[in-house]
Image (cartoon, rainbow, N blue to C red):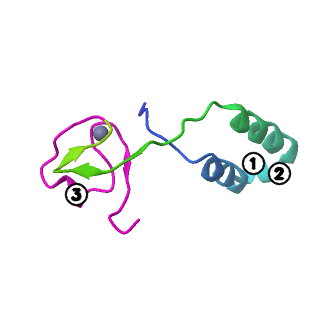
Amino acid sequence: MNNDLISRKAAIAFLQSIPYIKEHPNMGELMKEWIEQIPGVQPKTGRWIDDNCSECGQYVYHGDANNYCPNCGAKMESEEN
Ligand SMILES: [Zn+2]
C-alpha cells in the first residue's frame, strides 16, 4: 500500500458517493467520524535553491520545473509568492 497523502475532504466526498453508503446514512456518518479522527500531517513547503530542495537538501536536475520535491514531498512555493 502506498504511504502517500490523501485529502480528508476528498475521502469523505468519495465515501458519500458510494451507493451503499447513500442507502445507509448512519454508516456514512460513522465512517465520516472515523476519517475525521485519523491523524493528519501538515504538508511542508520549501523552495528550490540552485536545484537543491530547501527542506531536505536533495539535488534535483532542473528541480525548479517540479512543484514537489521527489525526495521529501515538500510543496515548492512559486517565485511569484
Ligand atoms: Zn526535499
Query: Amino acid under label 3?
Result: Asp
Are circles 1 and 3 on residues that touch, CB within 8 Å? no
Structural distance between the alpha carbons of marks 3 and 2? 48 Å
Q: Tell me the number on the disc at residue 23.
A: 2
13 or 25: nearer the eye?
A: 13
Q: Is residue 65 left or right of residue 30?
A: left
Front-most of residues 33 and 16: 33
Pick whichever, 11 or 46, lies toward us: 46
Q: Say whether mark 3 is within 8 Å of ligand 1.
A: no
Q: What is the x, y in percent for residue 62?
A: 14, 55
Q: Which residues are magenta?
A: 56-81
Residue sitting nearer the eye, 59 or 50: 50
Residue occupying image coordinates x 17% and y 50%: 51
Residue matched to label 1: 20
| Residue at the (54%, 35%) spot, across then down | 41
The correct choice, above or below, for 66 with respect to 2 in the image is below
Read off the residue under disc 3.
64
In x, y percent, where is residue 77? 38, 57
How many C-alpha atoms fall within 10 Å of the one at disc 1: few (<14), some, or many (≥20)?
A: few
State if disc 2 and disc 3 touch (CB < 8 Å): no
Q: Which mark is residue 58?
A: none
Name the kind of residue labelled 1 in the image: Tyr
Ligand 1 found in image quarter:
top left
The location of residue 13, given as percent across then percent down, is 67, 55
Q: Which mark is in front, 1 or 3?
A: 3
Q: Are marks 2 and 1 in contact (CB under 8 Å)?
A: yes
In space, the residues marked 1 and 3 are separated at their CA atoms by 45 Å
Q: Secondary structure beneath disc 1? A: helix
User: Principal SS element in the magenta part?
Assistant: loop
Q: Position of residue 76 (x, y in %)?
A: 35, 53
Front label number (3 vs 2): 3
Left or right, 21 with reference to 46: right
